[in-house]
Image (cartoon, rainbow, N blue to C red):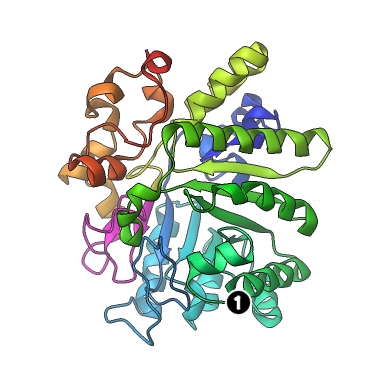
Amino acid sequence: MIGISKLYCGTVEPSDALRYGRHSSKLPSHLLQFSSDKRPVVVWNVTRRCNLKCVHCYAHAQDMTSFEDELSTEEGKKFLDDLADFKVPVILFSGGEPLVRKDLPELAEYAVKKGMRAVISTNGTLITSNKARMLKEIGLSYVGISLDGMEAVNDRFRGVKGAFKSAINGIRNCQEAGIKVGLRFTINKFNVDEIPNIFDLLEEMNIPRVCFYHLVYAGRGSGLVKDDLTHEETRSSVDLIIERTKLLHEKGIEKEVLTVDNHADGPYLYMKLLRENPERAKEVLELLKMNEGNNSGRGIGCVSWDGEVHADQFWRHYSFGNIRNRPFSEIWTDVSEPLLGKLKEKKLHVKDRCARCCWLDICGGNFRVRAEAVYGDVWAPDPACYLTDEEIA
């Protein structure tokens, strides 16, 4: 994650993270990315079921009554026990659509009682007033609701008419219940023009947070390489996000704006600041070094509905093991697993322009799964890196 508002608008200083000792157990959520111990944030895809049919779904989710091999409630609690003992700071319940699991509130409440921050990633369409109040009562920290634009564009991406209106109702229900709610938006050729509308929606509905995700070629999204932005289009979209964030800040409207899944955004933002505000650029470089760029297999991990452990939610084709056989904590720290061991030190293994890049320490080699999808080589350069040869020299 690259915090545009944190870095460009100066809402976070290096001293903010240092004050807490940079330990994940002590850092507030908005500073967690600057931790030094990199305890993994764990995404748990609690189900493959979903009530929508999103064209870019990394989980190949389907609208079915059940899938075989989903972890049971008791297996889930045992898993959460292990995460708590392992000092995992955040558990993100995702799917499919996590709210189709009837025991999700029970699992989330259990995680909170074990001392973890529990958040959910949802399409928002199933969040009724009662469900929102229940999630508030159990201590849920945050609800991220996915939108891909305004009504016509969103419903086309989501594959169900009425999905946009239902998601907006879900946002309102969260707000009325007092739960922090934010937006998640995946950028591609067909919705990039919706970015200004998303910023307008933040203002209109007083939504405090938005994450703009770059497209990752995985799941149903693996066939969408052709639908990704060109490098020039990506630069333009990041410029637009930066500019709209700056305008909000200048108006005194506090919003947390982040870009996700393309760590070239960090150096790009730094170089922009170096031209505009060299003093702030020095502070931003320090924060980017703390962030360390992509952390797949280190600072973020994923467990599927069937217990398989992955480097992140986009690596479903490669498993490090299953929590039914070994605890997550054991699997995650076993560097004898060939890929996991290399991901924990990926800067030693990346090739070509990634290996030569002067920003490697703050990008972390970007997304290996995108390199594999395009070139068939995990360690090849990330094809979505839009920095020029001159910029990385």
Q: Residue furthest bottom?
A: 65
Residue 28 at least partly seen: no
Quadrant housing residue 8: top right
Residue 262 higher or lower than 86, as above or below: above
Residue 252 position, x and y percent, is 84, 38
**Residue for point 74% across, 51% down:** 200
Residue 269 higher or lower than 194, as above or below: above
Q: In this image, 314 relative to 42: left or right?
A: left
Residue under circle 1?
162
Residue 225 position, x and y percent, is 33, 48
In this figure, what is the number of numbered marks? 1
Quadrant housing residue 170: bottom right
Q: Which amino acid lies under the numbered mark 1 shown in the image of this protein?
A: Gly
Q: In this image, 90 relative to 390: left or right?
A: right
Q: In this image, 166 relative to 355: left or right?
A: right
- Specify the principal SS of the magenta part: loop
**Residue for point 67% across, 46% down:** 196
**Residue for point 44% across, 38% down:** 262
Residue 107 position, x and y percent, is 49, 73
Residue 142 position, x and y percent, is 62, 59
The kind of secondary structure element at disc 1 is loop
Q: Nearer the viewer, residue 158 or 156?
A: 156
Q: In this image, 166 relative to 177: left or right?
A: left
Q: Nearer the viewer, residue 190 or 393?
A: 190
Could you tell me which quadrant the C terminus lies in? top left
Neighbour class for label 1 at 10 Å: few (<14), some, many (≥20)? some
Magenta stretch holds residue 326: yes
Q: Which stretch is magenta?
A: 301-327
Residue 48 at least partly seen: yes
